[in-house]
Every structure is written in structure tokens, then in C-alpha cells.
Image: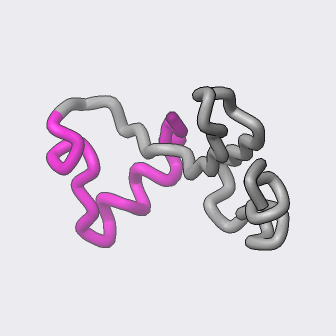
Amino acid sequence: MFRVPAYLREAYVGIGIDLPRFNGDESWELPIPATFVIDTDGIIVHAQADPDYTVRPEPADIVAAIPCL
């Protein structure tokens, strides 16, 4: 989880985003986007997670990680 820093909390509140109400607690946390490829045996063969939501794997890299392809 990504904990929203204090300076961003003020900005969120200023534009009407009530993250604690949405989350149902006082955590000020957001999920971190992640991509996993899991083989038929339940083994993770590819994983990527980054707190920067703009960093995403290339689709070709995901396809290449799929064992049956």
C-alpha cells in the first residue's frame, strides 16, 4: 500500500477527495498497481508492482511471460 503523504492529503481534501471515508478507516492508503502471471502450477512467473501508477509493464512482456505461449 502507498501511504499518502501529508502534503497530498491537504490537496486531496482541498478538491473534495475524502479518502478515509472511501476506505472506511483513517489509513490514507492507496493500493499499488501490480501485474502477476501465474502458471498452471500456481507459480508466479512474472511480477511487477510500482507505487507510481504510470509505470506499467509492456503488454508484449506480459504475453512473453505466459508459459503456454
- Looking at the image, how many numbered discs can be counted on the residues? 0
Q: Which residue is drawn at 62% across and 60% down?
A: 53
Work out whether 2 lies above or below 67.
Answer: above
Q: Residue 23's quadrant in the figure?
A: top left
Place of residue 66 in the rendered image (x, y in percent of width and height, measured from the top left): 74, 54
* Image quarter (top left, top right, bottom left or bottom right) of the C terminus: bottom right
Q: Which residue is drawn at 73% across and 45% down?
A: 48
Place of residue 38 in the rendered image (x, y in percent of width and height, measured from the top left): 63, 39
Residue that lies at the very extreme toward the front in this rendered image = 68
Place of residue 37 in the rendered image (x, y in percent of width and height, measured from the top left): 66, 46
Nearest to the observer: residue 13 or residue 63: 63
- Check if residue 13 falls in the magenta segment: yes
Work out whether 56 lies above or below 47.
Answer: below
- Check if residue 3 falls in the magenta segment: yes
Q: Residue at x 79, y 69 (%)?
A: 58
Work out whether 33 lies above or below 29.
Answer: below
Nearest to the observer: residue 37 or residue 69: 69
Nearest to the observer: residue 64 or residue 3: 64
Q: Residue at x 76, y 37 (%)?
A: 45
> Magenta span covers which residues?
1-24
- Tell whether 55 sits left or right of 51: right
Colouring mode (rainbow / by chain / secondary structure / one colour): one colour
Place of residue 68 in the rendered image (x, y in percent of width and height, measured from the top left): 74, 54
Q: Residue 29's quadrant in the figure?
A: top left
- Tell whether 44 sits left or right of 18: right
